[in-house]
Image (cartoon, rainbow, N blue to C red):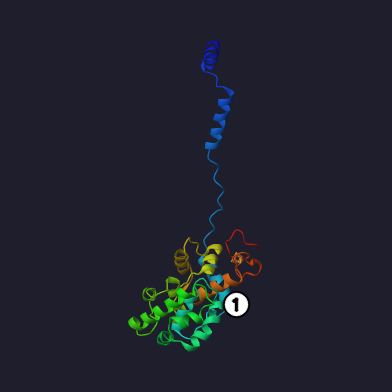
Amino acid sequence: MAKITRSISAKKSSVPSVPKKVAKKATKKTAKATPKPAAKKSPKPKPWTPAEVYEAFSRFRKANPEPKGELEHLNPYTLLVAVVLSAQATDAGVNKATRALFAVADTPERMLELGEEKVREYIKTIGLYRNKAKNVIALSEKLIAEFGGEVPRTRAEIETLPGAGRKTANVVLNMAYGEHTMAVDTHVFRVGNRTGLAPGNTPLEVELGLEKVIPPEFMLHAHHWLILHGRYTCLARKPRCEVCLINDLCRWPEKTV
Ligand code: SF4
C-alpha cells in the first residue's frame, strides 16, 4: 500500500507545472471551443388526424358555405388577367383598376385593340404596372395565337402564358373551371404552416400537403376558406385566436387561447 502511494506521488511531481497565465489562456480557449448546447427545439406538432381535418373544414363550410374570391372578373379571361395583375398587390387595389379596364376590354381581342399604352394607363395604380401591362398584352396574343382566344384548361398550358405561374394557374383552374386545385398565396402558406395542417418550406410543399390531407368534398372551396381565414382571422402579426373557428384543433404553440 505504502509503495503505491509513493509511486503516485512520484509521478505527480514529474509533471512540469504550467505557468498560471498559460493555464488561464488554455482554459479560456477550451471554453470558447466547447460548442454551446443546442437550443431546445420545440417538439414537432402532432399531425392532424383525418377526423380533425374533416371537423375543421366542416366548420369552415358551416360558417361560409359558398366562399367567394375577392378578385372581380367577368369570365375566365378577365379572371386570368386579374390574377396576373394581383402579384404583390392587394385584391382591392386590383379591382379598383380593373373595373374600368374590363368594361372596355373583357376578351383578348379587345385587350389587343386597346393596346399596351392604354392598358398601362388603366392599371398604373398597381405596383409593377409597366411589366404587368406588357404581360397582359403578350398573354392575350398567345391566347389568340395558340388557344383560340380561350383560357386553356390545364396547369401546364396556363403556365406557358406570360406573367402566369403555378399559383395563377391554380386560381384560374379552381375558380373558372371548378378544378380541385390549391393555390398557395402568402395567407394559405402561413395558415398551412401555423396550424400544422400542411407544414412546408415552400408554397409547393404546402400545396401538395394540403391536397393530401383535405377530403375531396371540401377541395372546391378549400382554397378560399384558407385564404379568408388567413386574411381575416389568422393574421400574420396578431392572429385572432380568440375568435378562430379551429382554435381547439390548431397546433401552433403560440396560439393565444
Ligand atoms: S388558433 Fe390562432 S394561430 Fe391557430 S389558426 Fe386560429 S388564429 Fe391561427
The location of residue 229, given as percent across then percent down, is: 58, 71
The quarter of the rendered structure image containing the N terminus is: top right
The location of residue 10, given as percent across then percent down, is: 53, 13
**Up/down of 31 relative to 70, above or below:** above
Residue marked by disc 1: 63
In this view, the residue in front, 55 or 187, is 187
The location of residue 9, given as percent across then percent down, is: 55, 14
- Is any atom of residue 68 visible in this view? no
Instruction: Residue type at mark 1: give it.
Output: Ala
The quarter of the rendered structure image containing the C terminus is: bottom right
Which residue occupies 53% across, 55% down? 44
Label 1 SS: helix
- In the image, 239: left or right of 44? right
Mark 1 lies within 8 Å of ligand 1 (Cβ measured): no
The location of residue 116, given as percent across then percent down, is: 43, 81
In this view, the residue in front, 13 or 84, is 84
In this view, the residue in front, 130 or 90, is 130
Which residue occupies 52% across, 68% down? 186
Determine the quadrant in which ligand 1 lies. Answer: bottom right
